[in-house]
Image (spheres, helix red, strand yellow):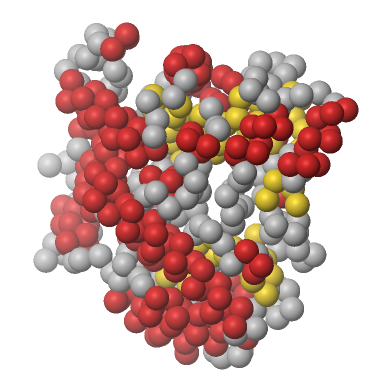
Amino acid sequence: MKQTPPAALAVLWQAAAHHEVDRHRLHLVPSENGLSLGARVPHLMEAAVRYAFPGPEGGGENWAWPGQQDLVGIERAVAGRLGEQLGAEFVNLKPTSGVSALTVALSALAGPGATAFNLAERDGGHGSTRFIGTRLGLRMKDLPVDPATCTLDLDALARRLGTGPRPELVYLDAFMCLFPMDLPGLREVVGPEAVIHYDASHTLGLIAGGAWQNPLAEGADSLGGSTHKTYPGPHKGLLATNDPGIAARLDEHASHFVSHHHPADVVALAVAAAEMDERGPAYAAATIINARRLGAGLAERGFTVCGEKGGFTDCHQLWIDIAPLMDAEEASRRLLTAGIVVNAIPLPHITADAGLRLGVQEITWAGMGTAGIDELAEIVTAVLRDGQDPAAVAERAQALVEAHRPDSADEHVLRVALAAIGIGGGA
């Protein structure tokens, strides 16, 4: 066996050190999730280094990359499984990320010069949508949002469309979200000709688990997004629709924007999709229960939690206006010292430059229930409200990590792999 070069070993030592520290933290970032051992294993297989493309017009494989029938079969099967979870007849797995799916959708669903509406960043829209749409030649305009409810202001939109251009595309890109959108109402306002695309990056797992609105059933023409937030899969993306014409356009544009869509990630997504078939409904419901419980617990302890009138949240996210206590970045640093990772990020409709955006999907996927959520609220309160030394509180956060850690097989496999290249022991 060829020896691993010293420079490569140094890189792996560094990554292993990060892994060891990071696995002892509670992760509350809404855009991340855990990945099972089964979904990690494909990256050690031949799938990680091979090309595999489904053949044209439903063929088994592309003749230019022979011998990949098994990988092609897996892709077709997981597309079908995801379609069942999302209520979609057509699923495209070419996108390599949420922004990759975003780019394909903007290109495929509206041509240069067309008017497209999306959410402004100040209202929770994704920062890349306006940039990419403008570069593609679209005339991008803001969707109006009601600050009191953090939802679309359809009356304001109707007034705007009465005096201005009507959209060819409405791109719903809320990466900051608390509550569902009124998709039937939006359809009534924009009319039957406009294409409504729903970016489900953050809520994909909740949709698949039946605990969030199903966009394709409520009026959206297509949906897309990443597969590693509330959906506990690899860093990848997808597009889905029930419209054959839209599916053909998405396929065409995806084939040009993405040359290779990473078979190992497709296999990992297939594993995650099978896990969601088994655990998805219970997990999705528990995620929302945990988010609301944490929101209520923090509010009871004096924190300013956005969306209180609506029950704080209907998804995995919580927004905390931490400015009455301290700067958001300082709060994030203190929590990190205590072993808790959170976003310090600009929040819609607060006066401070940033707040805290929390997500409970990863700890819920790991099995945390309401007792753990209550303890988490106490730990956050001790660190941010009561001024306790974060390092002294860290053992309480570590106890929650240990109580919800995956079985030891994950670490055993990693240790064996590292030992095989000369790092550590394999016991």
| Residue 13 seen in render | no
Q: In this view, does 176 lie to the left or right of 350?
A: left
Q: Which sits in the foreground, 77 or 406?
A: 77
Image location (x, y in percent) of residue 318: 57, 64
Q: Which sits in the foreground, 251 or 308?
A: 308
For residue 270, what is the image quadrant? top left
- Give the tally of numbered discs: 0
Name the quarter where the C terminus is drawn: bottom left
For residue 42, what is the image quadrant? top left
| Residue 236 seen in render | yes
For residue 198, what is the image quadrant? top right
| Residue that extends furthest to the right in the rendered view of this protein | 163
Which residue is pictured at 64% across the width and 23% down the height?
192
Which residue is pictured at 21% across the width and 59% down the height?
410
Q: In this view, does 99 lie to the left or right of 309?
A: left
Q: Which sits in the foreground, 109 or 194?
A: 194
Q: In this view, does 76 lie to the left or right of 101?
A: left
Query: Relative to 18, is 237 above or below?
Result: above
Q: Which sits in the foreground, 82 or 261?
A: 82
Image location (x, y in percent) of residue 145: 74, 48
Image location (x, y in percent) of residue 138: 72, 23
Query: Relative to 234, is 56 above or below?
Result: above
Which residue is pictured at 34% across the width and 58% down the height?
283
